[in-house]
Amino acid sequence: MASPWLIGLNRVDCITLISVPLTVLAMHETLQDRFLSALALLYLAMTADALDGMLARRWQLTRNFGRYLDGFMDVLIYLVTPALIVMQWGDSVVLLFALMVMVACGCVRLAVFNETGNIGDSATELAYQGMPVFWSLFIIAPVIWLNTLDILPMVLAHWLLVTGLLIFSYRMVRRGRFFKFSSLKQILPLTLGGFLLWMSASADTGQAKALIQALYLQIPVVIGGILHMIVVSRDDFPALAKPIGHRAFGANKTWRGLVVVPLLTAFGACLLYPLEWLLGATSPFSGQPLWLSGTLAGLGYVLAELPNSRVKRRLGIAAGELPTQGRVIAIAADQLDSAIGVAVVYVLWLDISTDIVLWYIASFPLLALLVKGWLHKHALKSHAR
């Protein structure tokens, strides 16, 4: 007996269709002028959109119908709903024209993708042919957010968005390789992180400003950490590459890290001088020497790792290894120890609010994972510090 339904949906199709209620809710939020919460829901829909293809390949459920269904969801998530958000946020003839161009080019881009798919010979070499449509959210969300915070005046935000959308439209239909996110470690921090960011920003602009300041405070530590890995990969200062206490902390905690990281973090802080001139008294570093703030942050970073290393050595866990039991706790401790150390330094040294401190500790592990992923990709991450 023939089925009365047009087609039978599999579990991957159901994951794809999760985008429908999320985008409808986003439209509802848009009509209530809650633009950031609408964008947050679209980032959540983007998570489902990113997962369905991966799971289809893993579960061997790939089929043409799934690709077509995914394409329709892409139109809904990345073209129609964002266009509605922008029109409700700022109505102008030029902006309306840019949105029409974006939607038209996006539909052409998706039609070509449904016919040709990705380009590349292997999973690690896959790339998009042209700029993918999901970049609409990465372009639109920051502009509306900065305008909401009164950092971007409406006129400037309008023209910035018009320019960005027109360039985006051109790149969507331009032939050429475009980077493709290939793993959940790359995708989930962007999608789920974006959801949490815009939801928190929509609830309280004061929290959004605290988050921006927390991310700004991380810049010296990120620069210092990257430069330190370059020093380690080149084996600079070999005389200092000796363990601080092999039995107590293991072979990975060296005098080189203890000396070099604070100096490099101080350098990273000094690179902020042009921004400090623009921010003035609104900077969280205001009133304190940048070089000294960076040095203290670097010290907090490396010293806070030592107690965690000491505990793991006492438990018989080798340097650079994870325990067979309690792996989640160990991973969390590895990411949070330095975050807490730097946060304590900033609390004692700078005049910052509790909200900034909490956002710093919460955002630090996510940013650390992204940076470490980049370092591993470029063969810079090493165990010997």
Image (cartoon, rainbow, N blue to C red):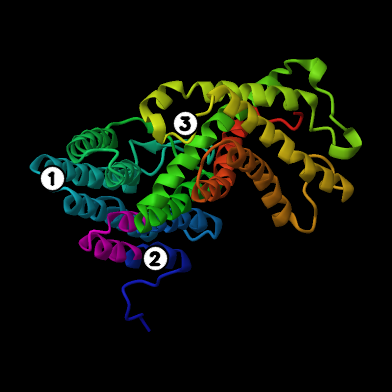
Label tally: 3
Image check: 363 left or right of 239? Answer: left
Q: Mark 2 points at which residue?
A: 18
Q: In which quarter of the image is the N terminus?
A: bottom left
Residue type of the residue flagged with mark 1: Leu
Residue type of the residue flagged with mark 2: Ile
Q: Vertically, is 254 above or below 66?
A: above
N-terminal label among 3 and 1: 1
Nearer to us in this view, 216 or 368: 216
**Mark 3 residue crowding within 10 angstroms, few (<14) / some (14–19) / many (20+):** some
Where's residue 331, x and y in %? 69, 50
Most extreme residue toward the right, as rendered? 247
Where's residue 241, x and y in %? 80, 22
Query: In which quadrant of the rendered view does residue 369 lie?
Result: top right
Give the residues in magenta. Answer: 22-40
Nearer to us in this view, 73 or 5: 73
Q: Mark 1 points at which residue?
A: 96
Where's residue 313, x and y in %? 86, 44
Image check: 316 left or right of 261? Answer: right
